[in-house]
Amino acid sequence: MKIPSWFNQKRFTSIVRVASAVTLISAAAAMAFVAARPSSAAAPNYDINTLAGKVASLRGTAGLQIRFSAFLEQEAEEPEGIPAPGSITPIHVLSSPLDGTTIVAPDVLVNRDTAGAPQN
């Protein structure tokens, strides 16, 4: 049996080399294209300083099979914009000489030991 002239070992090796090179170059180009192109579905940012942000972050994590308790999820749904009540200022404030920070005569300073520890 005679081997056809177009099928010799040199030519076959050359064709295999060219096909391998083309395959590797196209695979490298595809990987470079995927790596250089930013993802169209960017991950959302959550404010994890708030309870609502933490719950949203946990819910938005794909494949994570844990969750917060129902109480925490309910608390996260409530608005946090409840204003704090104003400070309480009494109408009548009693002034007392005991509120001062200075000692006036005839009172005396008892702790005169300067080398000792404070006894207050």
Image (cartoon, rainbow, N blue to C red):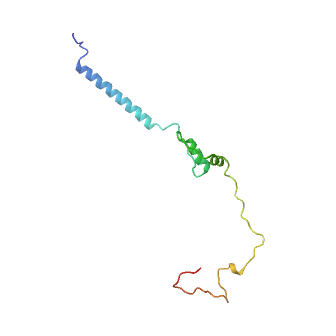
Q: Is residue 19 above or below residue 45?
A: above
Residue 38 horizontal/vertical position (percent): 48, 38
Q: Is residue 28 above or below residue 14?
A: below
Q: Quadrant of residue 100?
A: bottom right
Residue at 44%, 37% (x, y): give it.
36
Outermost residue to the right: 91
Residue at 62%, 48% (x, y): give it.
52
In the image, is 16 to the left or to the right of 106? Answer: left
Foreground residue among 27 and 100 = 100
Image quarter of the C terminus: bottom right
Residue at 25%, 20% (x, y): give it.
11
Residue 9 horizontal/vertical position (percent): 23, 20
Outermost residue to the bottom: 106
Q: Quadrant of residue 87?
A: bottom right
In the image, is 84 to the left or to the right of 115? Answer: right
Residue at 26%, 23% (x, y): give it.
14
- Tag count: 0
Foreground residue among 76 and 85 = 76
